[in-house]
Image: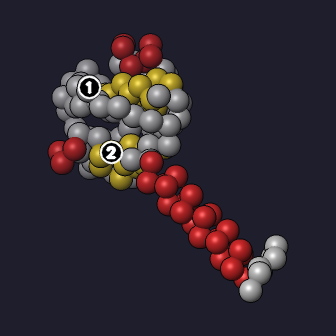
Amino acid sequence: MALGRGSARSGAAAAAALLLGLLVTSAEAAKYTVGDYGGWKFNVAGWAKGRTFRAGDVLEFKYNGAVHDVAAVDAAAYRSCVVPKGKRALRSGHDRVRLVKGMHYFVCTVRGHCKANMKIAVRVI
């Protein structure tokens, strides 16, 4: 029996192809827990070294929100550990950031924590 455009079988095939495409797309994005099992903590600055991050990947910051936070900053703030006044920081203790292409810098804004290497620089391709 010949099937025409709009037949049930061609519709099912299209739906299956769409689902497969969505699965492949979501499988490409990776989730990284910053600091691995230790989480977002002091001396985590070298954590990103040797890792390849791609656009769409997610960084997960796990930490005690009562004593730490995390803020996305520019390169100058990252290097100097001087965060501009009014800079919004995440404080949930379980924050997720989806990455886009380029350089990203994150620091803990609590006094002295960035200087104790509670900061990371991430290059996304």
- Relative to 58, say whether 46 is above or below: above
Q: Residues within 10 Å of mark 1 (few under 14, many from 20)?
A: few
Residue 32, numbered label: 2
The answer to whether one can see residue 109 in this image is: no
Could you tell me residue 120's position as x and y percent?
32, 28
What residue appears at the point 36 percent right and 53 percent down from the top-left corner?
A: 94
User: Crowding near pointer 2: few (<14 within 10 Å), some, many (20+)?
Assistant: some
Could you say which quadrant of the image residue 20 lies in? bottom right
Which corner quadrant of the image does residue 68 belong to? top left
Q: Residue at x 18, y 28 (%)?
A: 43
The single residue placed furthest to the bottom in the displayed view is 1
Ranked by sequence position, the earlier of labels 2 and 1 is 2
Q: In the image, residue 57 lies at what x, y percent?
A: 44, 43
Residue denoted by label 1: 49
Label 2 SS: strand
Residue 14's spot in the image, x, y percent?
Answer: 67, 68
> Do we see residue 124 in this rendering?
yes
